[in-house]
Image (tube, grey):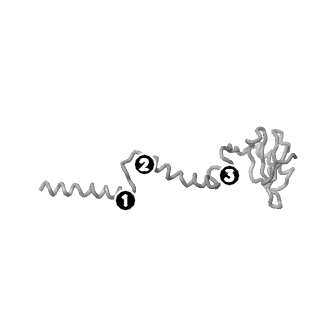
Amino acid sequence: MNAKIRALAVIPAVALMFSLAACGGSDSKDDAKDTAATVSAPADAGAAEGGEAGGEAGDEAGEKKEPPLTGAIKEKAEKAALAAHPGTVLKSEEDQENPGLYAVEVQKSDGTAIEVYLDKSFKVVKTKEEGTEENEG
């Protein structure tokens, strides 16, 4: 009788082993690392191909994320940029390449975009047509 009981006790253990193998389960301590690498791979792959993954397409490697403008500063910067270059504001942010300046990207009525750089007193100090070098202005 003991042989029958032992045989029956083995069945659940074998079933559990097969179900873990079918699910990709493992007793390895590296499972958490493997899962994390698998989960982050699609986002990293998109960034490597020039897609968006935590930043804009076309951002250069190592480029700092520019903090968006908020509150009264945002309102004043956008108003000053639109007064100089009418259109629709696409984004407004602190400029990391030119510390101390605000950058407001405006889409003009002809569909082109221009980056308007303003100093801390909201005076336009230069502009950059998207896809061109910076212009004084």
Q: Which residue is mark 2?
A: 31
Q: Amino acid at mark 2?
A: Asp
Q: Is residue 125 left or right of residue 93?
A: right
Residue 10 location (% of width, % of height): 23, 55
SS type, badge 2: helix
Q: Tell me what residue is drawn at x 82 percent, y 57 percent.
A: 108
Q: Residue at x 18, y 54 (%)?
A: 6
Q: What amino acid does circle 3 point to?
A: Glu
Q: Amino acid at mark 1?
A: Ala
Expressed as whole percent of the image width and height from the top left, the position of residue 58 reads 69, 52
Q: Who comes first in sequence, dot 1 or dot 3?
A: 1
Closer-to-camera residue (133/12):
133
Give x and y (percent) for residue 102. Answer: 78, 43
Tell which residue pokes out farthest to the left in this image. Answer: 1
Distance, label 3 to label 2, CA atoms, is: 32 Å
How far from the left and from the top, in percent, is residue 113? 79, 55
In the picture of the structure, the residue carrying the numbered disc 3 is 56
Label 1 Cα crowd, 10 Å radius (few <14 / some 14-19 / many 20+): few
Quadrant in which residue 8 is drawn: bottom left
> As rendered, which of 56 and 8 lies closer to the eye?
56
Residues at marks 1 and 3, CA–CA distance in whole angstroms: 40 Å
Tell me the element at label 1: helix
**Quarter of the rendering occupied by the N terminus:** bottom left
Q: Quadrant of residue 9?
A: bottom left
Dot 3 or dot 2, earlier in sequence? 2
For label 3, the crowd category at 10 Å Cα-Cα, with few meaning under 14, some 14 to 19 and many 20 or more, is few
Residues 107 and 72: in front is 107
Q: Does the residue at mark 2 contact the one at mark 1 (Cβ under 8 Å)?
A: no
